[in-house]
Image (spheres, helix red, strand yellow):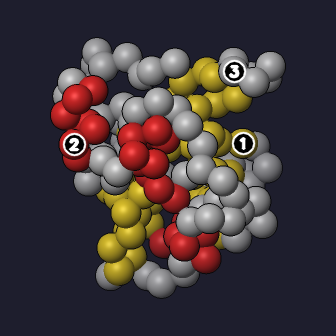
Amino acid sequence: MTTSQSGFEITKPESEWRTILTPEQFNVLRKHGTERPHTSPLDKEYENGTYFCAACEQPLFTSDTKFNSGTGWPSFFNPIEGAIALTVDKSLFMTRTEVHCSRCGGHLGHVFDDGPAPTGKRYCMNGVSLEFVPA
């Protein structure tokens, strides 16, 4: 399954994404892959800063919305306004809400309704899809 490129501000042919992204980033961001849990150093990153899309550098989350979900993936309870797009994912014999970068359509992860207050959401992101810039 690949993300439709229509409707996103940044679109590139697959060959160009392959030159910009590492193989692991390409698999997650462009082919909807998932990194193994507990493999991203961003899971335990708690410095002040901003998390950007690794494909197009759009700001997605701020460190003040990050929390330790215990899942092995970086988790946030709220994205930056307008930074993400949501779609329904019916793969793996279940229905989940998939999270994409609203600018380039890159697959970031999924959102679940078991997060902390104030939103009750857990945006469970693949660390490889993010770039962290300290404040």
Image coordinates of residue 55 in percent, x first then y, are 30, 46
Of mark 1 and mark 2, the one earlier in the sequence is 2
Residue identifier under label 3: 91
Which quadrant holds residue 90?
top right
Residue at 78 percent across and 66 percent down: it is 70
Q: Do the CB atoms of the residues marked 1 and 2 lie less than 8 Å apart?
A: no
Which quadrant holds residue 8?
top left
Tell me the quadrant of the picture where the C terminus can be found: bottom left
Residue identifier under label 1: 112
Do we see residue 72 in this rendering? yes
| Residue nearer the viewer, 123 or 31 | 31
Image coordinates of residue 13 in percent, x first then y, are 21, 24
Inter-mark Cα distance, 1 to 2: 32 Å
Nearest-to-viewer mark from 3 and 1: 3
Residue at 26 percent across and 53 percent down: it is 57
Of mark 3 and mark 1, the one earlier in the sequence is 3
Q: Amino acid at mark 1?
A: Phe
Of mark 3 and mark 2, the one earlier in the sequence is 2
Secondary structure category for the residue under label 2? helix
Residue at 22 percent across and 42 percent down: it is 19
12 sits left or right of 104 in the view: left
73 sits left or right of 17 in the view: right
Residue identifier under label 2: 19
| Residue nearer the viewer, 41 or 59 | 41
Inter-mark Cα distance, 3 to 1: 15 Å
| Residue nearer the viewer, 69 or 93 | 93
Secondary structure category for the residue under label 3? loop
Nearest-to-viewer mark from 3 and 2: 2
Image coordinates of residue 21 in percent, x first then y, are 30, 47
54 sits left or right of 128 in the view: left
